[in-house]
Image (cartoon, rainbow, N blue to C red):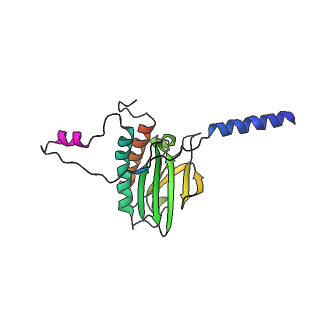
């Protein structure tokens, strides 16, 4: 009996130590819409320089990548039921917040970019063929990492092992997957960008 109790205690302790909480949300800012700065010279190289992120500014690079997700949500507004006024935000702790204001309810989905699985083999893309009404995708949470938290009007509603995004167009799905995984790879220091 004592042996079973010790085993149970050790198992529960190990299990709890393997899961982590999302870091607090600090200085969350909307990623904004994509804006392409034209150069006075008209040269493409000058335009690329003008639109590049500052070297070493991880948050800026992640925000620019996530602008694609914001644009995809803007395109889905009014086309996908329940997708209305969506704002994509990023904070100092690399928390991605997707805030959707619809029919008097604000639903906020919070995922830490360091927790998301960026392996394309593990990203589930779904379509109406699979019983879904609209195209979208799910990005899983890495084992032992902070779960995705869903809040309704600021109150925790549920925790999930995945981040789910529903959009109106398949092209937007593919672009958003690339943008989201890029942002997560920057957060996880797995993208070769020359940043410490």
Image x and y of residue 180, in percent: 41, 46
- In reply to whether residue 105 is colored magenta, the answer given is no
Image quadrant for the N terminus? top right
Q: Where are the magenta residues, as a range?
A: 38-51
Work out whether 45 lies above or below 176. above
Work out whether 51 lies above or below 97. above
Image x and y of residue 21, in percent: 58, 43
* Front position in the image: 81 or 100: 100
Seen in the image, is 162 located left or right of residue 136? right
Q: Residue at x 49, y 53 (%)?
A: 164
* Front position in the image: 15 or 196: 196
Can residue 188 be seen by looking at this rendering? yes
Image x and y of residue 67, in percent: 35, 50
Q: Residue furthest left?
A: 41
Picture quadrant where residue 77 is located? bottom left
- In reply to whether residue 45 is colored magenta, the answer given is yes
Image x and y of residue 172, in percent: 36, 55
Q: Residue at x 42, y 60 (%)?
A: 86
Q: Residue furthest right?
A: 1
* Front position in the image: 182 or 157: 157
């Amino acid at each position: 009996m004592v042996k079973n109790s010790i085993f149970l205690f050790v198992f529960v302790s190990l299990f709890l130590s393997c899961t982590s909480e999302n870091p607090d949300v600090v200085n969350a800012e909307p990623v904004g819409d994509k804006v392409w700065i034209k150069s006075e010279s008209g040269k493409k190289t000058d335009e690329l320089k003008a639109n590049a992120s500052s070297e070493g500014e991880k948050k800026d690079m992640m925000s620019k990548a996530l602008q694609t997700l914001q644009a995809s949500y803007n395109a889905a507004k009014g086309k996908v039921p329940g997708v209305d006024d969506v704002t994509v935000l990023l904070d100092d702790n690399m928390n991605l917040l997707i805030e959707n204001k619809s029919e008097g309810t604000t639903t906020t989905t919070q995922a830490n970019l360091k927790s998301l699985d960026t392996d394309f083999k593990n990203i589930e893309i779904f379509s109406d063929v699979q019983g879904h009404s609209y195209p979208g995708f799910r990005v899983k949470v890495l084992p032992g990492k902070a779960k995705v938290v869903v809040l309704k009007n600021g109150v925790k509603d549920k925790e999930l092992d995945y981040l789910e995004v529903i959009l109106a167009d398949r092209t937007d799905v593919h672009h958003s997957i690339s943008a989201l995984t890029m942002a997560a790879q920057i957060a996880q220091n797995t993208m070769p960008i020359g940043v410490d």
